[in-house]
Amino acid sequence: MMHKAFVVTVVLLALSGRCWSMHQAFDCNKASSRVGKLICTNAELGALDQKMSSVYAQAQEKESDGRLSNLETEQRAWIMRRYACEKATCVSRVYRERIADLQAQYRLVMANGPFFFLCLSKPAGELKVSFFETDPPTMIAELVKQTVLMRLQPSASGTRYQGKSASYWEHHDEAMVIWGLGASEQRCVPRTEK
């Protein structure tokens, strides 16, 4: 008897007409890896796997043909990170982060913003930020023609987000931004309308 997740996978594949290999829903009768077995025996992980399939398919639909290979490369890298997990808590975290990143990057959920700040130190310019109600919460910041996706981080006060090469901390309507590896923190103030 086929596992329910596999049946759903086959139906979704038939409806989407897309290559399913990047979606990675499991045939639990054939799952042999530690992570595959975790996903097949843990209801939360099984639900996250199905959600990933749906969100990834939505991202594929929004991606242009020229960038589709980048999305697939990023998904392969994510699959490797998932397989590196030892415990269900790690697998759950990795799924949630990737789902949230895709939802923000491809605007699959509503954004709060954009909000604008003026940064006077290098790199000076207009900082544009948009916040997404994902799990975990995410934001996209743009400064000097560079865009960085960040995730909400624990903070004693204010709101702090961290990305690969930048961080954002908002407190009392001001933003403190580190933009680039090894860069100094700079203060950005809300842009006032002219």
Image (tube, rainbow, N blue to C red):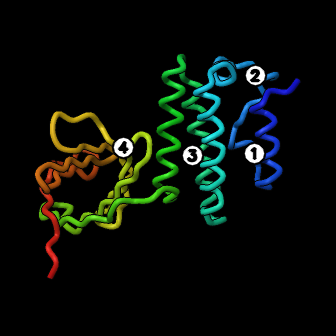
Who's the residue at 59% across and 54% down the image? 70
Return the residue nearer the eye: 180 or 4. 4
The disc label shown at residue 151, or none? 4
Q: Secondary structure at mark 2?
A: loop
For label 2, the crowd category at 10 Å Cα-Cα, with few meaning under 14, some 14 to 19 and many 20 or more, is some
Alpha-carbon span between mark 1 and mark 2 = 16 Å
- Tag 1's secondary structure? loop
Q: Could you tell me if the residues under marks 3 and 2 are in contact, i.e. CB atoms within 8 Å?
A: no
Give the mark, 2 or 4, whose residue is nearer the N terminus: 2
Q: Position of residue 26 (x, y in %)?
A: 74, 31
Disc on the earlier residue, 1 or 2: 1
Quarter containing the N terminus: top right
In the rendered structure, the answer to whether residue 71 lies left or right of residue 162 reads right
Q: Position of residue 76 (x, y in %)?
A: 62, 40
Mark 3 sits on what residue?
Answer: 74
- Which amino acid, mark 3? Glu
Nearest to N terminus: mark 4 or mark 1: 1
Type of amino acid at the residue the image marks with label 1: Trp
| Dot 4 amino acid type | Arg
Question: Outermost residue, bottom direction?
Answer: 194
Residue 30 is marked as: none
Disc 3 versus disc 1: nearer the observer? 1
Alpha-carbon span between mark 3 and mark 2: 23 Å
